[in-house]
Image (tube, grey):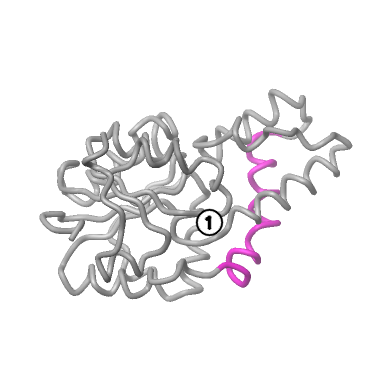
């Protein structure tokens, strides 16, 4: 099993624990409409892996917005909060997988590019806050994904060495961050990153379509194809 000899499992949030990327599609469309600007065609490729703060800075700089960083972040948080509480669900099998990790005394961390406010709201709404041992957002470190900072900081909080950590990620930038941290990485299928599947396969150690495959040992082991 992929969690053998692992002391910690670290999850990304969006697209990994929950199908939530559609929220940001809607928010970005509304945001650009309010600013009187056309929606950029390749926006999400451009900001992939950036922290919440880095993304706000990027928007302000590239689109010459009159708002400051905190105003942009507050706007995004306000629009997204209710959606994260009421309109997102856990990926299939994740709840059972989290229970298994707790039963086996494997520590659980989250390393996300999203805001802490939205993450906490998501966890609280699903009574998961108590089962998470460490949380780091990319705003807490110097550089966002694909740099390893957010994963290394989470491992440090968990007091577990990187080689004993297993990461779950849905996008190439996140997978690369986990690998650069010296961790084992399992790619998670998500509709949002479906076109990036080949790249995810090339970077990750394992691949799942949902967490039930971890529980019943039907995940794809990609290590022999590197």
Direction from residue 133 to residue 78 in the image, left or right: right
Tell me which corner region of the image, top left, top right, bottom left or bottom right, holds residue 173: top left
Q: Against 49, is 98 above or below?
A: below
The residue indicated by pointer 1 is 117
Q: Name the foreground residue: 162 vs 128.
A: 162
Magenta span main SS: helix
Residue bounds of the magenta highlight: 68-88
Q: Name the foreground residue: 80 vs 170.
A: 170
SS type, badge 1: helix
x, y percentage for residue 135? 36, 53
Q: Name the foreground residue: 175 vs 8.
A: 175
The quarter of the rendered structure image containing the N terminus is: bottom left
Tell me which corner region of the image, top left, top right, bottom left or bottom right, holds residue 184: top left
Residue appearing at x 24%, y 72% in the figure: 100
x, y percentage for residue 108? 27, 60
State yes or no: residue 30 in magenta: no
Residue appearing at x 38%, y 68% in the figure: 94
Tell me which corner region of the image, top left, top right, bottom left or bottom right, holds residue 80: bottom right
Residue appearing at x 36%, y 65% in the figure: 211
């Amino acid at each position: 099993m992929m969690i053998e000899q692992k002391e910690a499992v670290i999850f990304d949030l969006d697209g990994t624990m929950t199908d939530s990327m559609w929220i940001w599609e809607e928010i970005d469309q509304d945001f650009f409409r309010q600013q009187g600007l056309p929606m950029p065609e390749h926006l999400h490729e451009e900001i992939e892996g950036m922290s919440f703060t880095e993304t706000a800075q990027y928007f302000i700089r590239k689109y010459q917005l009159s708002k400051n960083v905190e105003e942009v972040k507050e706007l995004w948080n306000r629009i997204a909060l209710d959606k994260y509480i009421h309109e997102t669900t856990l990926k299939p099998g994740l709840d059972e997988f989290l229970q298994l990790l707790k039963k086996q005394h494997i520590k659980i961390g989250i390393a996300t590019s999203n805001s802490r406010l939205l993450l906490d709201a998501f966890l609280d709404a699903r009574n998961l806050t108590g089962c998470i041992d460490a949380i780091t957002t990319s705003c807490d470190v110097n550089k966002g994904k694909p740099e390893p900072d957010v994963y290394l900081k989470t491992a440090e909080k968990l007091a577990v060495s990187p080689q004993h950590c297993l990461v779950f990620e849905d996008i190439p930038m996140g997978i690369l961050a986990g690998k650069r941290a010296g961790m084992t990485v399992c790619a998670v299928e998500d509709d949002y990153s479906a076109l990036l599947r080949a790249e995810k396969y090339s970077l990750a150690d394992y691949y799942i379509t949902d967490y039930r495959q971890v529980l019943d040992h039907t995940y794809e082991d990609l290590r022999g194809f590197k």
